[in-house]
Amino acid sequence: MLTLLALCAGLAAGRVVDSLDGVPRGWAFVRDASPLDPIRLHVALRQQGADALEQAVMETTTNVTNWVTRSGIVPVVNNDFVTIDTTVAKANALLDTSFAWYQYEDSNEPRLRTLAYSLPDDLVTHIDMVQPTTRFGRFSAKKSTVFEVHYPEEGSTSFVAAQTADAVSCSPVTPACLKSLYNINYTAPSTGNLLAIASYLEEYARYADLQTFESKFVPAAKGQNFTVQLANGGLDDQNSKSSSVEANLDLQYVVGVAQPIPVLEYSTGGRPLVPTKSQPTPPGSNEPYLEFLTYILAQDDADLPQTLSTSYGEEEQSIPRDYALKVCNMFMQLGARGVSVMFSSGDSGPGQYCIRNSDNATFFEASFPAACPYVTAVGGTVGVGPEKGVDFSGGGFSTYWQRPAWQDEMVATYLRDIGDTYSEYFNSSNRAVPDVAAQASNFAVIDKGRQISVGGTSASGPAFAGAIALLNAARKSQGQPPLGFLNPWLYNNSAAFTDITAGYSVGCSGVPGGAKWNATAGWDPVTGLGTPKFDALLEAAAPGVPNA
């Protein structure tokens, strides 16, 4: 063992490539890691340009795998990633670091992490990142953006009575309400397109609940089912005792808005696991975004969905920059291959605590991955006649990404209008979120046989994604390609949205008095461009296709 460790130490990295100033807020050191603790690491290889020679790609892979195998570790190569299953002792030597166990304040599942790691000088240009190392994040690898769930009292009939409410009143919100509110009358062909949702954290959409939902709220879809693909050890457990609210909400509203377009659920594993012989993933090691994106990007274009809705996120500052940039670039690849990707913008207004980890200064927090410029961030509204921004709609400005050119005009107008308000608390030159909005409160959902009321941008995300799926289907009917990466097209067609000028979002519980964003004329960090006018979007996406 000493001989091996000495060899590894001789191979140790020469340059610190990522480091944290200290243990992130909310986390605490638990104990030193045992040298024999198992750990799984993902080495992300730097992607070559489109014109790169195959030889250059092979050289990168070879250099990295040689570095790993010299340390007595057998790597597994999967496209742009090298996976390493090893021990803490070898990982410490390989990365010139010291892994330890850390735990988040409301969690009982510690994670193996470190505050810095290094790479050999000659590999720095070949490797984008190694994770999980400095990626602390929240207790859950992802946090559902369901904000509110209300269960009826035993024997209550109020939810049942609400089923017959006028669709336009949206009390509760149903697919009929959304279609009426946003003027969605188009019926897509039942073949030729695919709409997908991404499920994490052992949440599984339920077949029986979908059938009940269709019978009550979408009679035209009665009998439509969905398919499931499993990634990174994901399951399709219809008898799980875990919550299924998020997965059922996502599924029921993409089906409700976009039927009869086929729907697929990607069930991705990745919550920290206790290793077993049949499931040997080391605890605290999984990184589901990377696992999911690696899985889906390996598919042929013909097998990809045209629209993908995801209702998960976490504070951007909790994500190491290299990890965030890598994941965002993978979403860019999806967009370039014709997949329109929607993410809920979050449920904390300007931020949950608004305390910067690095120096405890007041700073507004964007949500990740919603702040990635290659996904469409969906905020929330409430009410009808008129709609207004809902008070939890997440929004603001990224720390990692500069503002894209397609946002410049509208966001610059907003910044000019608010003057110096809050200017010291966000980077006004960076990517702004959300891009768009939709209803986000009091959604009728069937979960484990009961009708419940659910709210959050977890609701607005799939509602908007359903509308985009219909646009992609309309384009397909004309022989046009799918919309793919949406955002430049959305901002070029801002007139196809209802501008929301009432309401506000609140947050920053860690700051005395909190803070809020206001919904205003034009783009704003509560509702983005506004809510969809489907007839106008349809005319822009597929001219001549009737909204009927």
Image (cartoon, rainbow, N blue to C red):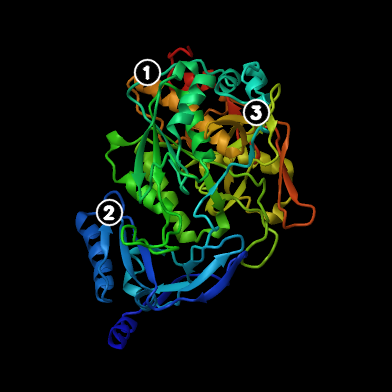
**Residue at which label 3 appears:** 499
**Residue at which label 2 appears:** 79
Residue 418 drawn above or below residue 273: above
Q: Are marks 3 and 1 in contact (CB under 8 Å)?
A: no
Residue 153 drawn above or below residue 6: above
> Nearer the N terminus, badge 1 or badge 2?
2
Query: Residue 436 lies in what quarter of the image?
Result: top right
What secondary structure is marked by label 3? loop
Which of label 2 and label 3 is nearer to you? 2
Along the viewing direction, whichever of 49 and 163 lies nearer the viewer: 163
**How many marks can you see?**
3
> Nearer the N terminus, badge 2 or badge 3?
2
**Residue at which label 1 appears:** 189
Amino acid type, mark 1: Pro
Residue 149, percent across and down?
A: 63, 38
Q: Which residue sits furthest right?
A: 513
What secondary structure is marked by label 2? loop
> Nearer the N terminus, badge 3 or badge 1?
1
Which of label 3 and label 1 is nearer to you? 1
Q: Residues within 10 Å of mark 3 (few under 14, many from 20)?
A: many
Q: Which residue sits furthest front?
A: 155
Amino acid type, mark 2: Asn
